[in-house]
Image: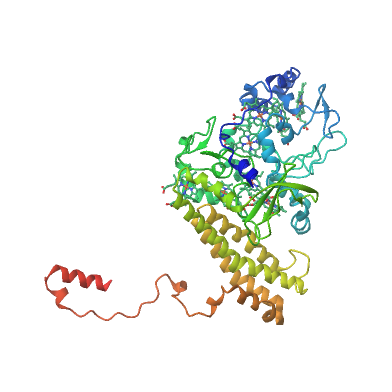
Amino acid sequence: MVAGVCVLLAAGAAQAAKVELSAEHWGNPAGERCVSCHEKSSAGLVRQWHESAHREAGINCLDCHQAEAADVDAMEHEGEIIATIVSPKDCGRCHTKEYEEQAGSVHAEAYAKIETRIPALAHQMTGGAMQVAGCDQCHGSRVKVLGDGTLDPATWPNSGIGRVNPDGSKGSCSSCHGRHAFSKAQAREPSACVRCHSGPDSPDKEVFEASKHGMLYAAQRDQMNLDGDTWIAGQDYTAAPTCTTCHMGAAGKIPATHDVGLRNAWNLNQPVSHQQYLVLFEDGSKLERPANEAPPRRGSELEKTDGSLAKVRAVIAPERRRGVMSLVCLECHGKAFTESFMTQFDNVVELYNSKFGEPAQAIMRALYEHGLLSPLPFDEPLEFTYWELWHDEGARARHGASMMSANHAWWEGMYLVGRNFYSRFLPQARAVAGEQAAELIDPILAASGQHAWLNETAQGNPILGWMPPQPEAPEPEPTAATSADEGEGEGEDEEGGDQ
Ligand code: HEC
Ligand code: HEC
Ligand code: HEC
Ligand code: HEC
Ligand code: HEC
Ligand code: HEC
Ligand code: HEC
Ligand code: HEC
């Protein structure tokens, strides 16, 4: 626990992490030839490099692209051994801190974790071409090298966030840092994130733009100091937070981090959300575990995502992760404001869980267990209805509430969850269950205790229009107070009483 807190709060680490290798380790003279020839064959690319911090520090093409002859993706190119892919491990030669933070993050695991879940969506329902042009562009691929050292077009190019590289490292630093400028100013912009974080299941672009933060960012972008050497919220800028501010950026004593999952208490993209522990292993890897299970003990062994065992170094509780996120807010907001906002957000997640997420999941389980749905996913209408309930509108409601977009929390979120739960999911589930509906579905709804409103009397009815139909109002009878100019006080009292 203590170690985990240190990782999160290491005081003084809010300054920029400087490269530790000395300049003797780069500026390979053989790299000059790459530049002079590529200036002709790919002028734009070389120009980007020319204007980069790397060029300024004397780092050339070969410093990044050089490879060992034994590397699987090494190829002989104009008298040098190079590789096309410059992996996070390669960047990590110089940028140790960023590499280590990125290495165990949810981002780095984004392909490994979903590999077994891809076939149902991208192979069975559609086709393999969609894995390459869809999933892989965001999540990454397992890159295959052909016999001559070139990369298999079925697996490259993409700069997916969890790409499994030929050297075994995961991710791609150019997911967010466009090459060959590799600029930090560019990565601080929301646009660095939103090519992946937009659309139905992770609508963070839409949510951010519709929030007050997005509004102020758009209006005051020139006050954001995006080019600053350091970029500490509350010191280097105050106009608005961006994605980077809240999920990665430095604020006060909170250091910047390349682990985007660190400050999140929930998992918002599951059928039912759980608060989560973050387990840090001694080998540097990490694991998310639901907080409703007992936390693993420090020093104990635990199975990692890849099935191997590792020793637990520290466990960070969800409250601690929430605490770090809140410290970012506190640079620009008060404590009561921040805590009350978080309460409003948590209440939405809990409402979603208990009223819709848990009952719908339990109903689907029951239908599968009784053989009323085939085990094959996406071959029956109810499966699409259920999927969209949690994966699209369910995620949108939770993301909207967590990042201050009332529109996404309600109209494009929970309103659609409610509509689809009552008008599609339940009728379809009842049709699938047939005579067993009373036994399989009704007890689940009753146990949730939140669907009893269906038996209540109406509390107003907005369906025919916003105003409830008014009964014919009788003609008002003239009174002494309204007809004559009498004492002011009396007249006011009467008006007040009428309202
Ligand atoms: C999820 C997007 C993302 C990925 C992936 C990413 N970065 Fe960054 N990087 C950023 C952002 C945003 C900043 C600016 C952070 C700030 O100033 O608060 C940054 C800043 C940096 C800096 C400047 C640090 C400083 O303080 O001056 C370096 C160096 C860096 N990244 C290297 C890497 C390396 C190496 C990788 C791959 C292991 C990588 N980045 C992957 C988003 C990313
Ligand atoms: C005499 C010219 C010349 C020199 C010298 C040269 N290149 Fe190239 N390089 C090319 C051409 C031409 C291509 C193929 C066309 C293309 O991809 O633009 C290429 C392709 C590449 C590729 C892409 C390979 C792929 O998988 O598609 C990389 C990476 C590369 N060069 C890096 C380097 C590096 C690093 C050096 C210095 C060690 C270097 N080049 C030196 C001309 C040259
Ligand atoms: C800071 C490290 C770095 C430097 C310096 C660098 N590259 Fe790259 N280069 C990369 C990365 C990262 C990729 C992306 C490969 C991937 O992950 O798919 C890349 C990809 C490429 C590609 C293939 C992708 C494409 O867009 O066509 C070529 C060609 C290339 N580099 C040439 C060069 C040349 C020429 C230079 C020198 C002017 C150079 N690189 C300097 C990191 C670097
Ligand atoms: C436009 C980019 C994009 C595409 C395309 C995409 N995803 Fe995702 N996916 C994401 C993002 C972003 C998240 C994380 C959502 C979050 O946590 O807010 C995610 C989350 C997931 C998760 C949940 C991971 C977990 O933590 O359990 C799975 C499974 C998944 N995607 C599978 C797929 C598959 C399979 C495909 C292709 C059929 C695909 N995705 C296509 C961006 C994408
Ligand atoms: C040979 C050492 C070396 C390698 C390899 C290297 N870098 Fe750098 N990088 C530096 C140095 C030196 C600087 C400039 C000084 C600094 O910011 O610490 C720098 C600066 C940066 C910056 C900050 C740029 C800015 O806007 O100020 C980013 C981002 C970055 N590198 C990303 C990467 C990525 C991504 C890779 C791999 C594709 C990579 N670097 C590979 C040494 C290296
Ligand atoms: C190339 C695509 C891509 C880019 C660019 C990208 N992400 Fe992600 N991000 C993903 C995917 C895919 C996931 C889901 C990973 C998983 O759950 O396994 C994810 C997950 C996340 C999560 C959820 C972590 C958690 O706790 O579950 C956060 C927060 C996040 N990204 C923030 C960012 C920010 C901030 C940026 C920009 C600085 C960014 N991402 C850039 C693809 C991307
Ligand atoms: C004002 C701060 C703030 C800004 C700006 C912000 N986020 Fe968030 N984000 C949050 C909070 C708070 C949560 C909920 C974290 C939790 O789980 O407790 C969250 C949740 C998320 C999640 C879901 C993670 C999970 O818990 O499953 C993703 C993905 C994400 N944000 C990405 C982004 C992207 C991309 C942007 C920019 C377009 C962005 N965020 C802008 C504060 C912010
Ligand atoms: C860099 C400064 C900054 C950071 C960091 C920041 N905010 Fe804000 N936030 C603002 C500004 C400025 C406003 C607009 C204030 C206004 O005009 O009412 C705002 C507005 C809001 C609003 C809307 C208030 C309203 O009256 O409609 C909420 C809610 C909010 N922020 C929550 C958060 C939370 C939660 C966090 C941390 C996860 C956070 N903010 C982080 C600057 C910031």
Residue 420 drawn above or below residue 59: below
Residue 40 percent coordinates (x, y): 71, 22
Q: How many marks?
A: 0
Give residue 62's quadrant in the image: top right
Residue 401 percent coordinates (x, y): 53, 56
Residue 275 percent coordinates (x, y): 62, 57
For the C terminus, the quadrant is bottom left
- Can residue 195 be seen here? The reply is no
Residue 203 drawn above or below residue 241: below
- Could you say which is closer to the camera, residue 298 or residue 322? 298
Furthest residue to the top? 29
Residue 403 drawn above or below residue 185: below
Q: Report the image quarter containing ligand 5.
A: top right
Residue 124 drawn above or below residue 149: below
Give residue 400's quadrant in the image: bottom right
Residue 137 percent coordinates (x, y): 70, 45
- Can residue 272 be seen here? The reply is yes
The residue sitting at 72% across, 30% down in the picture is 93
The residue sitting at 71% across, 82% down in the picture is 435
How does the figure colour the protein chain or chains?
rainbow
